[in-house]
Image (cartoon, helix red, strand yellow):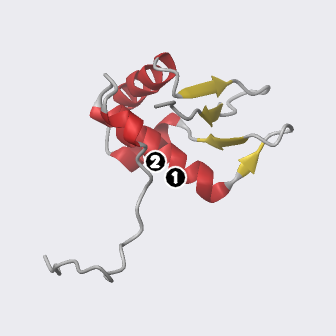
Amino acid sequence: MEYEFMTSDTPLPPCMPFPKALAGLPISSTAKVMYCKMLDAMLTKKLEDENGILFVYFPIKQLAAILSRCEMTIKRSLNELENAGLIMRVRQRGFAKPNRIYILIPKI
């Protein structure tokens, strides 16, 4: 593996945002990484609902593939994030439509 040392003018590779408030929360590492991935996707895709609020679609299978976790772990982590007040899932009308996931910003 190739590497280089960082200097003050070294450009960083693309990074996902990691809110500092996540570090102290009693949720799993998988849930924290998932939150960051969904936050990054939301800020990149910029999907807005009818009220101008950003959200993201992330089917369970897609999250499982991206995070290299099984679907059960993904479901458990989504529940952790929802119970911690970090996301809100809203069901869509229609058969087999993925939930809208609203990423909530934790207050410090």
Give the percent coordinates (x, y) of residue 17: 45, 52
Give the percent coordinates (x, y) of residue 23: 31, 36
Q: Secondary structure at mark 2?
A: helix
- Most foreground residue, 45 or 73: 45
The three-letter code of the residue at mark 2 reads Lys
Check contact, mark 1 vs mark 2: CB within 8 A: yes
Q: Which residue is mark 2?
A: 37
**Structural crowding at the residue carrying mark 2, measured as other residues with C-alpha within 10 Å and reported as few (<14), some (14–19) or many (≥20):** some
Work out how far the residue at label 1 is from the one at label 2, CA to CA, in angstroms: 5 Å
As drawn, which residue projects farthest toward the left? 1
Identify the mark at residue 40; answer none if there is no mark: 1
- Do we see residue 70 in this rendering? no
Left or right for 18, reference 104: left
Give the percent coordinates (x, y) of residue 107: 51, 30
Left or right for 17, reference 69: right
Q: What residue sits 75% from the left and 40% below the top?
A: 53
Q: What residue sits 55% from the left and 35% below the top?
A: 105
- Most foreground residue, 12 or 75: 12
Q: Where is 76 relative to 15, above or below?
A: above
**Structural crowding at the residue carrying mark 1, measured as other residues with C-alpha within 10 Å and reported as few (<14), some (14–19) or many (≥20):** some
Q: What residue sits 13% from the left and 76% below the top?
A: 1
Q: Where is 102 relative to 65, above or below?
A: above
Query: Quadrant of residue 3 in the image?
Result: bottom left
Query: Quadrant of residue 77 in the image?
Result: top left
The three-letter code of the residue at mark 1 reads Asp
